[in-house]
Amino acid sequence: MKYLEEVKMMTLKYAPSVAGALITLIIGFWLSGFLARRVRKILTKREVDESLVPFLSSMVGVGIKVLVLLSAASMFGIQVTSFVAIFSAMAFAIGLALQGNLSHLAAGVVILIFKYYKVGDFITVGGQSGTVKEIQIFNTLLVTVDNHLVIIPNGSILSGSIENFSAFDTRQLVMTFGIGYDDDIDAAKALLRKIAEENTSVLNDKDITIFVGELADNSVNFGFRVWVKSEDYWPTMREITETVKKEFDKAGIGIPFPQMDIHLHKKGDA
């Protein structure tokens, strides 16, 4: 009987705490799942990068679950301050060990949220140029024009300048072509304009600018500026370069190259 009395007293004593802890755990875990799904939905609606959505939503869910567990433990009279101190010490130690990686993590989150560039963009960062293959939490993967994979830490990207050549739908193609001083400037200028107007990748609704830009040592240099779609930039540059050479040859317009006149003097000549 005495044993049953003790069990009864213990039950009466701890029943409210147990019930409160169970209710807290049930509601808290449900709330963590609800908020995690809500965060996921908001991030997806705002078109945040897919690799960041599960990371942030799971972070929210885990964070709330930890708080719920600490609250439930306190209902049993457990001192949670010691747990907090242990967690803080562990977080500090991990933070020191992963200091560099954490900066890259933070930079990766910033890049994904503010969309300085996206997968498929052609960018120049940290002295490297290439097409963005993947934006990871810690690194950005670039593929160079000669098909090399370059892995750049996100922290170093944010610490320097970012040049995004694909940020806009159109780009201005700027080229320079030289002719000889004995060639007809007006004929060369008209031919360059004809080449620009007949190229199907050149946007004729935007300005086509052809002008004499420099009287160089060996040539008269024309500035050649047209607008193209960003994805057509490199193919159009190669196509126009080849076309100019062929059309100049047909028209008898020379493309000079650097040269030097050397005069030989006999010994004793003045």
Image (cartoon, grey):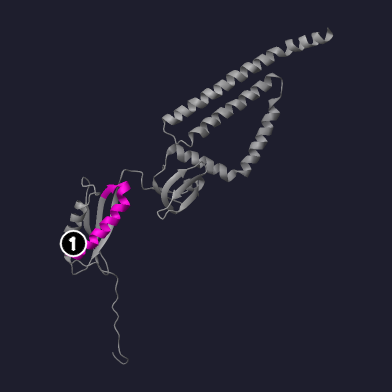
Q: Is residue 239 magenta?
A: yes
Q: Is residue 93 magenta?
A: no
Work out whether residue 188 or residue 6 is closer to the camera in this orientation and state it.
6
117 relative to 94 in the view: left or right: left
Work out whether residue 96 or residue 68 is closer to the camera in this orientation and state it.
68
Residue 56 shows in this picture: yes
User: At label 1, which amino acid type do we have?
Assistant: Ala
Q: Which residue is mark 1?
A: 188
Q: Main secondary structure of the magenta part?
A: helix
Residue 197 placement (x, y as % from top left): 19, 51
The residue sitting at the front extreme is 147
SS state under label 1: helix
For the point 48% across and 33% down, the residue is: 53
19 relative to 177 in the view: left or right: right
Residue 109 placement (x, y as % from top left): 49, 38
Span colored in magenta: 227-250
Which corner quadrant holds the N terminus? top right
Residue 186 placement (x, y as % from top left): 15, 61
Q: Quadrant of residue 60?
A: top right
Residue 213 shows in this picture: no
The residue sitting at the top extreme is 1
- Near mark 1 (Cα within 10 A), the count class, few <14, some 14-19 or many ≥20, is many
Work out whether residue 229 or residue 78 is closer to the camera in this orientation and state it.
229
Residue 82 placement (x, y as % from top left): 71, 29
122 relative to 225 in the view: left or right: right
Check the image and report above or below for 87 versus 24. below
Check the image and report above or below for 36 versus 261. above
* Total numbered circles: 1
Check the image and report above or below for 9 versus 67. above
Work out whether residue 236 or residue 99 is closer to the camera in this orientation and state it.
236
